[in-house]
Structure formats: structure tokens, C-alpha cells
Image (cartoon, grey):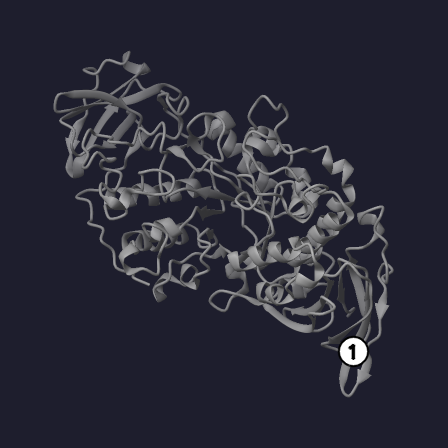
Amino acid sequence: MNTDTAAEPSASKCTLGARQTNEGFTFAVWAPHADSVSVVGDFNDWKEDAHPMESVEGGNWTACVESAEQGQRYKYRITTGDRTFDRVDPRALKVENSIGAGIIWQPSPDDTPAFVPPSLDQLVVYELHIGSFALADEAAVGTFEEAMGKLDYLSDLGINAIEIMPVSEFAGDLSWGYNPAHPYAVESAYGGPEAFLAFVQAAHAKGIAVILDVVYNHFGPSDLDLWQFDGWEENGKGGIYFFNDHRSETPWGDTRPDYGRQEVRDYLIDNALMWLDIYKVDGLRLDMTLFIRSTKGNPDDPNDDLKEGWSLMQELNDAVRHANPRAILLAEDLRDSEWLVKDTGAGGAGFSSQWCAAFVHPVRAALSQPADEDRSLESIEDALTSKFDNDAFKRVVYSESHDEVANGSARLPSEIDAGTPDSLSARKRSLLGAVLVMTAPGIPMLFQGQEFLEDEWFRDNVPLRWEKLDTYSGIHRCYRDLVHLRKNREEKTAGLTGQHIQICHFDPLAKTLAYHRWRESGPNDSTLIVVNFSHELRDSIEVEAPDTGTWVARFNSDATCYGDDFQNEGQAEAQTFEPEDREGQSILKIALAGYSAVILSQES
């Protein structure tokens, strides 16, 4: 990949935004084309002549206001040529709303102990949207406080990391969050910066890391004060923060940041560091990096390559790692290029891991296929065994995400049985998806409500139906058991935390598949997963075991505790299996109900 940068260093890097000093608050803003700038607000009755700002190197303007206090509103009044207009501080940490003023806010000193997030091999991620996750009133918007009330629930489920859809201030109160209007401010409808800070602290107290989605492939496009910020523009485009040629165009608006301008690169990198520094988040997930590294989403076309975007990701990831070596950096690129997760020193973008399209798409396609004979075991095998940069944990595996189940796209149970998503077949096959996610090499991720058979496609104004948790308590228990097995909570399935996988049974006619997972191998480590993708009972699946000795069933997705109409056929709880010696091979014979899976390991 191209590692060159087209960025030109700024003449002077000034500490921008509003910050408290011994003399009051100092305000600084970048507005290189302005003829004059003043800071106006509650502290001076919004009079532009009260606090004129001084022009300093690099196109920056600064002023100190002794009378300014925390909680007061403010803006910058900019004159360029014959025009005078107000702009919200691009680095405002708090705003009234997407069209309101900035609010002076700085956090109190934080003396809580530093939180250490789980290592990648131990992560189990839960993606959620604050606005709909724990919404109590359908007429309102979900808040950090309401979501905080579900942290005990997530902890009990076994989740040790949550990935939160973007919380930067966006237009209106309802949004997925991928339309940031004020990238440094926390969404006011969710509770603002104070509430987000409390949420992260509460998550850490429960042992849950927080990964935050950020959007650097475009801004806005609506309620965007960054647009023509200081009055300058070219070609009718966005001005100093944006490309002003064809590179500005994205699928979400004509608002791609100018990655080749150092001041804009600093703006994005400082934003990433802010989330770690102020809010102590444990990682970031960069939205659709494909449109950071290419103009139109064709990165294999040299004419579409956006080298400034690639070098920005490298610089940003290096800066975040310097600030926090354990930071979790995820890319949503969905082109499965291993260069995203290679180290920057080798020319890669330097992400820790990336969402894996090579897993989610074939798994959903195979499980939603109506006819067993058309179900592709080859695609399942490829999904299980793919990896990036020879490292299983450089991919995030999932069967549902906000993208997969939105815009009319269905949850997996509805893909399986659109008319009756709670049918026996839909429940059992969707659970096979959960088994694959939790036993495949990689970082497993769930999407909110998946664990209690939520079948409503994701919208920002439709709350999760938490009553389904009671209706499908067995499904929830199944997910909980799988998560605990994936984390090796009982110290019987360490293999699920390892790098290694080997297919040890493959029968495309019977639609049965088995694979061996291990970390170091041996008892309490080597783990066998046997899956029946057919609706028929298979009473003698022959699986080559990696070792002699007794094997114990730790999990059976057909257990009656997961569904009153499940049969637990062929497997009693903790059933043991003695392999046969067949010409030096240890062969296990396993009976397995239709659309079911069993997980086995050995005792020490």
C-alpha cells in the first residue's frame, strides 16, 4: 500500500478550543481566511467588540476571557470580506444541540484507577445504539443513563466489551450517529459529555471495555458549522475542512475532510485522542475506512486511490497507540484487505482488527438457505478458516450488526423464516450462527437484542423489545452459555481462545461439519465443535479426535433448556464419549439432532 503523505505541515500547531487557565478561559480557533474574529457569549452579552481575538501564526486566532465560566454558551463571530457570521467552535466539547451554541465544558480531574481492557483473544464484543438500546419510552430517545442500567445484564451475559455506535452531536435527536455535525461534542439528546463520562466509568467498574465508533470518512452533511467555516470555498464546496474538488464526494454527502491538509489531519487525530484522554474509552472503530482510503470505493483502481487518507489512518493509529498501547483499533472496511491490519512499519494501516465480510456474508447466506441440499458447507469452511495477516484475532466475526439488519434487511431469524421468525427452524438455525460466531477463530461480536431473538430490523426510532427476554429466556441462556465457553470461564475450553483451527470432518451430502480448536492443545484446551446443518437427525457422525481418552459434551444447542420444543436428541448433558481406535486414528461417533451443534473437550 502507498505510505506517502501529501500533507503539508501547518505553520504552527496551536492548542485550539476552549481551555481553562489561571486567568479564566482561553479560546483559540483556526480561521486562516478571516479578516477578524471575536469570541462572543453569555460572558459578554454576545457583543463582538468585547473580546476581539488576536491573529497568530498558522491562521489561528486566540483570546483570553477572564469572565468566562463553565456552562456558559459561546460562539466565534467571524468577518471575511463583507460578510460577518457566527460559528460554533469546531472543538466544542458540549453544545446546546446540533444548531445551538457551544457550551464551555471541561471535565473534573479523574482519579479513578486506569482500566485495562481484555486482550484481543479474550474479547467478546456487544454492539449497541444508545438511542434505542435501553429506551424506556417509545416517544423519547434512549440515554446513557438508561443504557447504564443494562450494564449488569451485559456483564451477566459475559460481555467484556461494548462497541457503541457514534455519539458525536448529530442533526436532530434521532440518528444512527453516522452524520456528525459537531465531531468533538457528545450528543445532547443522549445526556451530553457528563453522562457519557459516567457511562464509561460505570462500564469499567463492571469490567466492560468501551469501543466507540467514529466517523472520519465524511462529516454531516446537515447542521454542519464546519461548512465554509471561515467564509472561504472553492467550486462551491466546503472550505477549509474539506476537499474542494472531486475528492469531496462521498455516498453520504459532499463532505469528505481534506486529509492532505495538516490542520485537518490534526483535527481528526486530536479528536481520536480526545475520546481516549477525556472519556477513557478503550478503543475506536473507524466507520467505512474504504471511503477514507479511496474516493469512490474502488481501492484497486490507482485512479481512485486516496493516499492522503491511507497515511492519515497510519498517523492516527500510531498516535492512539502511543497514547495507549492497549487501545483497540477496529476498521470497518468490508473489503477484507489484510493491509488494514498490518503494522504501519510494514506499510499497513495499523488497525488491531477489522470487521470480516468473509465471515458474515457466507454464514448468513448458508443459514438462510431454505433447502438443505443447497446449503454450502464449503462457504462455511472458508468462513471459519479465513484470517488476516496470519492472525485470527485481526478479524471480528459476527452474524448480525447494525448494517446487516437495517434499511429493511432482516435479522437472521427473519432471513431464515420471514413469516415466522420464532419457528423451530428459525430458532435452531439462528443458534447455529451463534455457535459459529463463538467458536470460530477471531473476535466474536453480537448486536443488541440478538441474544433474545429480536427479529425487528434495526431503526434508530424503534426500541429493543426487552419483553422478548422473558419469552425467549432459553435463547438468552444459550447465548450466555456460548459466551462463557468462548471465554473459557470454566477452564474447559481454552481452545476457543486460541489461533488454531482444523477441519476434522466434512460431509457435504449429510451437511455435517466438525472442527478442532486449540490454543496449546491438550486436555482442557483442545475443543471439538460438531455441527449438523441438516434438518435430519444424524445418529453416527464420525469425527477424528485429536487425542485419545474421554471427551465430554460441554454444550448441546438442542438441549431442552434452550427451548421447550427442543429434543436434546442424541446428547445427554455432560455426556461422555470414548473414541474408537481405527488404524491409529481416534474416531468419535456422535449423534446430533437436526440443525444442532455440540461442543466437546477433555478433562485434565
Picture coordinates of residue 346, whole percent (x, y): 36, 66
**Residue 273 in the image, given as x and y percentages of width and height:** 39, 44
Residue at image mark 1: 587
Whether residue 364 sits left or right of residue 166 in the image: it is right
Q: Secondary structure at mark 1?
A: strand
Q: Position of residue 536 (x, y in %)?
A: 80, 61
Q: Residue at x 33, y 55 (%)?
A: 310
**Is any atom of residue 487 visible in this view?**
no
Q: Would you say residue 232 is visible in this rendering?
A: yes
Q: Quarter of the image holding residue 278?
A: top left
Q: Bin the neighbour count of mark 1 within 10 Å (Cα to Cα): few under 14, some 14-19, many 20 and up.
A: many
x%, y% of residue 533?
Answer: 72, 61
Residue at 79% across, 68% down = 603
Q: Is residue 248 left or right of residue 456?
A: left
Mark 1: amino acid? Ile
- Location of the C terminus by quadrant is bottom right
Q: Residue at the location (66% across, 66% down)?
A: 495
Furthest-bottom residue in view? 583
Number of numbered markers: 1
Quick one: 161 or 536, which is closer to the camera? 536
- Which image quarter: residue 408? top right
Residue pushed farthest top? 45
Q: Quadrant of the N terminus?
A: bottom left
Q: Is residue 453 left or right of residue 128?
A: right
Q: Is residue 500 above or below residue 32?
A: below
Residue in front for this viewpoint, 301 or 394: 301
